[in-house]
Image (spheres, rainbow, N blue to C red):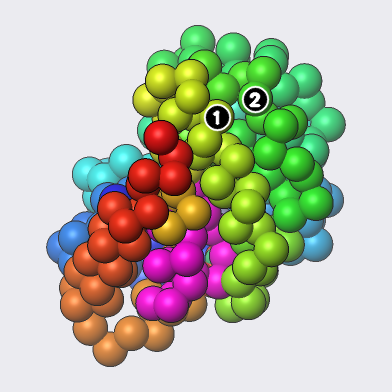
Amino acid sequence: MKISPSVLSCDYGRIAEELKSLEECGSDYIHIDVMDGHFVPNITLGAPVIKCVRKSCSLPFDVHLMISDPLKYAGDFCRAGADIVCFHIESDSDAGKTVDKILSCGAKAAIALKPATPAEEVFPYLDRLSMVLVMTVEPGFGGQSFMEDMLPKISAVRKEIERRGLDCEVEVDGGINFSTIAKAAAAGADVFVSGNALFSSPDRREAVEKFKSTAEQSFKKDLDKFN
Ligand code: DX5
Ligand code: ZN
């Protein structure tokens, strides 16, 4: 079970310190939301900022590209220090070529699915992915409510991974809190993005520990259903 805090909720003016604090509180990845104001109605940051903050933190950077043309920019994000480059299957880029590009640059490839996109869309690329990201809110903004109707999609992705014996993580992003994390884990997710819930916790270390133990218990309980 891994926790990937979303820096979308952090104070961007103190991003280096925030990354250090997230590392110290037991996070596994750092989730960096890249928005281009075109694929989603919001703009955040790009590869130059990622390159600058790379030296502040040794955790893997899990870079979530909410941009229209990930094929064009994937190389920049890899060179900036992204460890996992995740792009949306609904983007304008050819998904197969984008996966090839990311892998050829030495990063791990991941594909994200918006709420309306069925799980099956990602299946043709699954054997080359290290992670599938199931969005549990419409991408673009933090602080939204978890969409429970995405739970069957999380299970469908997990089941296909298990059926094919692949080493691929299932990440959930959007509205994760202490109650929704249990549901997502029970459905088969093993990487959890948290923005608002984690950043509004008085003690981040305690929050990360609680997230992990809750996910661990819930995932184990329901693992049988994937066999
Ligand atoms: C939304 C982003 C998320 C967001 C999650 O488009 O992809 O990563 O920061 O924030 P919370 O956990 O607040 O929903
Ligand atoms: Zn995200």
Mark 1 and 2 residues: CB-CB less than 8 Å, in contact? yes
Q: Quadrant of residue 69?
A: top right
Please, what is the three-letter code of the amino acid marked with disc 1? Glu
Please provide percent x and percent y for residue 38: 83, 51
Q: Where does the C terminus fall, quadrant-wise?
A: top left
Asked whether 83 falls inside the magenta stretch, the response is no
- Pointer 2 residue: 123
Q: Earlier in the sequence, mark 1 or mark 2?
A: 2
Left or right of 120? Residue 105 is left
In front of the other: 174 or 222: 222
- Tell me where residue 55 appears, x and y as whole percent: 27, 44
* Badge number at residue 102: none
Residue at point 32%, 57% (across, down) = 221
Residue in front for this viewpoint, 87 or 137: 137
Q: Residue at x 62, y 20 (%)?
A: 125
Could you tell me residue 153's position as x and y percent? 64, 48
| Disc 2 element | helix
The image quadrant that residue 120 belongs to is: top right
Q: Is residue 21 visible?
A: no
Identify the residue at horizontal 43%, vertical 67% (top origin): 181
Callout 2 amino acid: Phe
As drawn, which residue projects farthest toward the bottom?
202
Residue linked to disc 1: 160
Query: Measured along the vertical axis of the image, is residue 104 above or below residue 189?
Result: above
Out of 47 and 142, give the one closest to the viewer.
142
Q: Which residues are magenta?
A: 171-185
The mark lying in front, picked from 1 and 2, is 1
- Would you say residue 174 sits in the magenta stretch? yes
